């Protein structure tokens, strides 16, 4: 019988420390987003307000602010504007993602598409993106504009690639990594790289934070996918097994398929070929995952990216900001939400 990985009993406070270190600016980010989402269209106002009220960790905005601070940006509000841009891109992708997946719960509440329908959700997601690009143009930094524009394109490509491989339990781990590199890690990368671009740092610092963001994002997504087979709504903000019931193949299923016997492989294939999977199907998969120690294997792979992310910051001089961002790599794996 496989055992669930023993996560550190000592609470990793890096997320809270990062949040506290940029607390004033994070308030400004929220204000900026609320300001940009003002609209004369009642439905846009209702849906935007509902989305803002659902909260979220704002981790990508925090990384933008934290990396900017690490690079010596303290005065001014450009970091606030770009953190708001990153959050708007993320929010738009969540709205579109919920439509694609027929999602019903997001952050413990009903999704926008569940309340107002798919068409409105897609259009409001597009509205968020348009406001984001409006802010980028206002700043005028072409390098950051190019970075965030290409990031939006990568996210879309990642979503399409994932759709292409829906239900494909024989998907290569390499393909999975390409999907999550595009749909998740790309925005983490952009969030981390904005700071050194904005402060006109040498390329070696841009490269370092690019590597940090990418590997942090990979860790975060692997942990997210693993939690879906090892958590519940109360601590995670969504129902356990969402990926399974949506037919979405993630790392736990890919690793499981590599280890089980032929009869079990056929069973797993049949589950994912079905139009609708049952709770009983899910229980059988959870049993296979437990028996084959898959959760621990997933976390072991994530630890590789933790080390890459952490080591990327070695180029920076010792500082509180550096320590917080380094510790954040471990938080991304040890979190339970």
Image (spheres, rainbow, N blue to C red):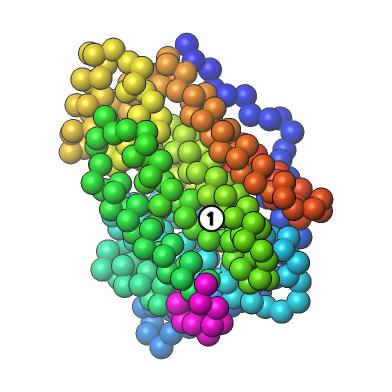
x, y percentage for residue 144? 53, 71
Left-right relation of 218 to 285? right
Secondary structure beneath disc 1? helix
| Residue at 45% in and 77% down | 133
For label 1, count other residues whose C-alpha is less than 10 Å away and answer few (under 14), some (14-19) or many (20+): many
Q: Quadrant of the C terminus?
A: top right
Along the line of sight, the residue nearer the viewer: 41 or 29: 29
Vertical position of residue 74 compared to residue 281: above or below: below
x, y percentage for residue 304? 56, 33
Question: Which residue is the extreme one toward the front?
Answer: 203
Magenta part of the chain: 131-143
Residue on which the image places disc 1: 188
Residue 209 can be seen in this image: no
| Residue at 43% in and 48% down | 181
Residue 282 is one of the magenta-drawn residues:
no
Q: How many marks?
A: 1
| Residue at 55% in and 45% down | 215
């Amino acid at each position: 019988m496989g055992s669930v990985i023993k996560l550190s009993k000592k609470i990793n406070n890096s997320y809270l420390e990062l949040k506290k270190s940029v607390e004033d600016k994070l308030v400004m980010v929220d204000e900026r987003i609320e300001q940009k989402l003002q609209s004369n269209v009642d439905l846009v106002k209702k849906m935007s307000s509902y989305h803002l009220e659902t909260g979220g960790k704002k981790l990508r905005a925090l990384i933008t602010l934290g990396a900017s601070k690490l690079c010596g940006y303290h005065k001014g509000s450009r970091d606030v504007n770009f953190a708001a841009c990153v959050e708007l891109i993320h929010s738009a992708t969540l709205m579109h993602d919920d439509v694609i997946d027929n999602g019903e719960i997001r952050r413990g509440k009903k999704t926008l598409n569940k309340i107002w329908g798919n068409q409105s959700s897609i259009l409001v997601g597009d509205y968020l993106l348009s406001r984001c690009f409006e802010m980028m143009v206002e700043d005028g930094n072409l390098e950051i504009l190019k970075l965030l524009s290409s990031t939006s394109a990568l996210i879309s490509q990642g979503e399409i690639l994932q759709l292409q491989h829906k239900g494909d339990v024989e998907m290569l781990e390499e393909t999975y990594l390409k999907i999550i590199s595009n749909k998740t890690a790309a925005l983490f990368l952009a969030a981390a790289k904005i700071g050194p671009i904005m402060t006109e740092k040498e390329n070696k610092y841009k490269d370092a934070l690019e590597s940090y963001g990418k590997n942090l994002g990979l860790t975060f997504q692997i942990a997210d996918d693993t939690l879906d087979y090892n958590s519940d709504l109360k601590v995670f903000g969504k129902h356990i097994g969402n990926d399974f019931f949506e037919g979405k193949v993630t790392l736990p299923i890919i690793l499981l398929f590599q280890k089980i016997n032929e009869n079990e492989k056929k069973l797993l294939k049949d589950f994912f070929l079905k139009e609708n999977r049952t709770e009983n199907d899910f229980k059988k998969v959870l049993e296979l995952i437990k028996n084959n120690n898959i959760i621990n294997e997933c976390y072991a792979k994530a630890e590789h990216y933790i080390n890459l992310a952490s080591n990327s910051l070695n180029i920076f001089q010792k500082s509180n900001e550096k320590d917080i961002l380094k510790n954040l790599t471990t938080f991304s794996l040890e979190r339970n939400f």
